[in-house]
Image (cartoon, grey):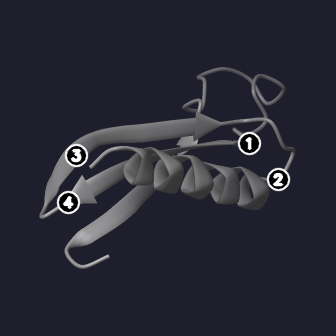
Amino acid sequence: MTGEEIKYEAWPPREQGGQHVGNYPMGVRGVHWREGHPSGVEACCSLHRSQHKNKIAVDEMIQWALSSYP
């Protein structure tokens, strides 16, 4: 991908509260960017207990969406 990237963030955002409220977000949200601007393609995944596995799933969803449209 030239001039393209996927930016990731933890999802859902961390909640405010005590030590037992939302220990940490395990989901991942990815947004596809092209030439410095969001392209409108994004994906979220929180199916797995691992952020790494969720990130792989987000990558696959975004690649599928990009390959489905000309």
Q: Is residue 55 left or right of residue 29?
A: right
Relative side of 15 to 66, left or right: right
Q: Amino acid at mark 1?
A: Met
Q: Which amino acid, by three-letter code, is at mark 3?
A: Ser
- Amino acid type at circle 4 is Arg
The residue indicated by pointer 4 is 34
- First-in-chain label (3 vs 2): 3
Marks 3 and 2: which is nearer the front? 3
Q: Which residue is mark 1?
A: 26
Q: Earlier in the sequence, mark 3 or mark 4?
A: 4
Mark 4 / mark 2, whichever is N-terminal:
4
Task: Name the spot of residue 70 as percent of width and height, x first.
Answer: 26, 49
- The residue mark sitting in front, 3 or 1, is 3
Distance from the alpha carbon under mark 1 to that under mark 2 = 6 Å
* Disc 4 to disc 2: CB gap under 8 Å: no
Tell me the residue that label 3 is attached to: 39
Q: Quadrant of residue 12?
A: top right
Which percent across, then down, holds residue 6?
39, 60
The quarter in which the N terminus is drawn is bottom left
Q: Which residue is mark 2?
A: 50
The reply to whether the C-beta atoms of the residues labelled 1 and 2 are less than 8 Å apart is yes
- Asked if labels 4 and 3 touch by Cβ distance under 8 angstroms, the answer is yes
How far apart are labels 3 and 2 at the CA level?
Answer: 27 Å
